[in-house]
Amino acid sequence: MLRQWFYRHAGHVHGPVTIRDLRAALLLRFVNPDDLVRERVLSDWTPARQVLELKEAARPQPGERPPANRRGFTLVELLVVIAIIGVLIGLLLPAVQAARESARRVACSNNIKQLALSTASYEGSKGNCPPQLGWSSGREGSGGFGTLFFHVLPYVELGGIYESTFVAPFGQQSRDVSSSSGSGMYTEYPGVYDSRHHAGRSGNGIYRVVVAGYRCSSDASTAYVDTGFGWSGASYAANFQVFGNAPSVTVGIAVNTSDRSTIEKWEGRTRLRSITDGLSKTIAVTEKFGTCNAVKGTQTGDYGKGGTMWARWDWPDMWQPTFAADPSAIGEAAMFQVNPSPYIYPGPCNPLVAQTPHPAGVIVAGFLDGSVRAIGATVSPAIWWASITPRGGETGVVE
């Protein structure tokens, strides 16, 4: 027979209850420690707090059901929980990755928009667009020398970098400087902004400066340009058909930028009013891998590979921040690539055309009117080329 207890609370007697119920009520404060309790067979009332002190009260009494044993998770239960968590992560991870990539593409689009607008701002200030590579004035030793990305620095709020390349008068008309990159000598003129300034003597030129606005976080290959070559990588390239000065140029020829006849072909200095296809239908800037057709962090086989260096000043080679320049990469052959593996030499990545790092197969392009559009890989090569040419009379990519 179960031992039964009664307790007196607030002047009323309650019960009968088991000792376990009584102890639980006491612990939960349903019974106060000073309330009186007694067992059925006892005649004396006892303070309830003494029940907790009675060790035998916690033991199962004859005929009383022992409390259930407490036990932890079994291995099977633990594995089931882990499996459920794994399934949930598997379901959520693609959504998280898609959200992150969407954010990266928005940031990349904003960079491209700023670059496209900078070319228009430059044209409004100077009367012509910046050259793809060369002297901003179109004359040797006048204005500024560098790539398009160098010339637009003041128009993307990076005027400090641009100003740092000013060549102060040094008491003579000009002087020859030996290049640290192995491209021979070049002439340095006083009173100009020269992206080569300091590079020949100290090797600390702006070509080493990392410009965050010239990189897309979806393009991880830019970091390998820095470590492998000492030049700063970029994720964007300018349209040679707009900013160059020839239908095409042989990219990668072994002629340095001191050769005037070579540079003249890169100095487009285009005026926007000459873009007869329309500013909203002509691409100014788009995406291109920092490293393309090159092994990570090595310089083996320099002339068979390339990518994008935003301040590439010494050679008009496959590291120039441009696309649609070489005769092998114009027309339908200028079609952009979708995520080609960039770290194989020789590999599938073609440094003469644009590439998209976005997994959805969408390339972001900035047009001369400052608009930015995402163009899917399903677009035909003919329409892509029509959007590159400024005066071809084609429709090009439309919204």
Image (cartoon, rainbow, N blue to C red):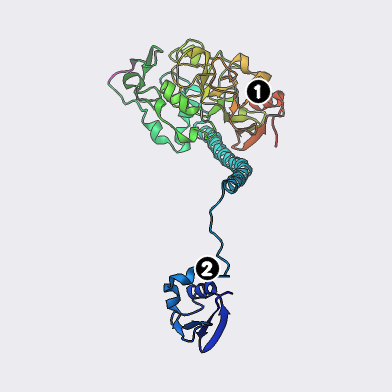
**Quarter-wise, where is residue 205 in the image?**
top left
Residue 60: which disc?
2
Q: Residue at x 49, y 83 (%)?
A: 42
Magenta stretch encompasses residue 173: yes
Give coordinates of residue 84: x percent, y percent: 62, 46
Marks 2 and 1, Cα distance to the nearest angstrom?
A: 84 Å
Magenta stretch, main secondary structure class = loop
Q: Residues within 10 Å of mark 2 (few under 14, many from 20)?
A: some
**Pointer 1: what residue?**
335
Question: Which quarter of the figure is the C terminus placed in?
Answer: top right
Q: Residue furthest top?
A: 254
Name the element at disc 2: loop
| Mark 1 surroundings within 10 Å by alpha-carbon count, few (fewer than 14), some (14 through 19), many (20 or more) | many
Q: Quadrant of residue 357?
A: top right
Q: Amino acid at mark 1?
A: Met
Q: Quadrant of the N terminus?
A: bottom right
Magenta residues span 171-175
User: Seen in the image, is 237 located left or right of residue 201?
Assistant: right
Mark nearest the camera among 2 and 1 is 2
Q: Amino acid at mark 2?
A: Pro
Residue 136 visible to an observer of this rendering: no
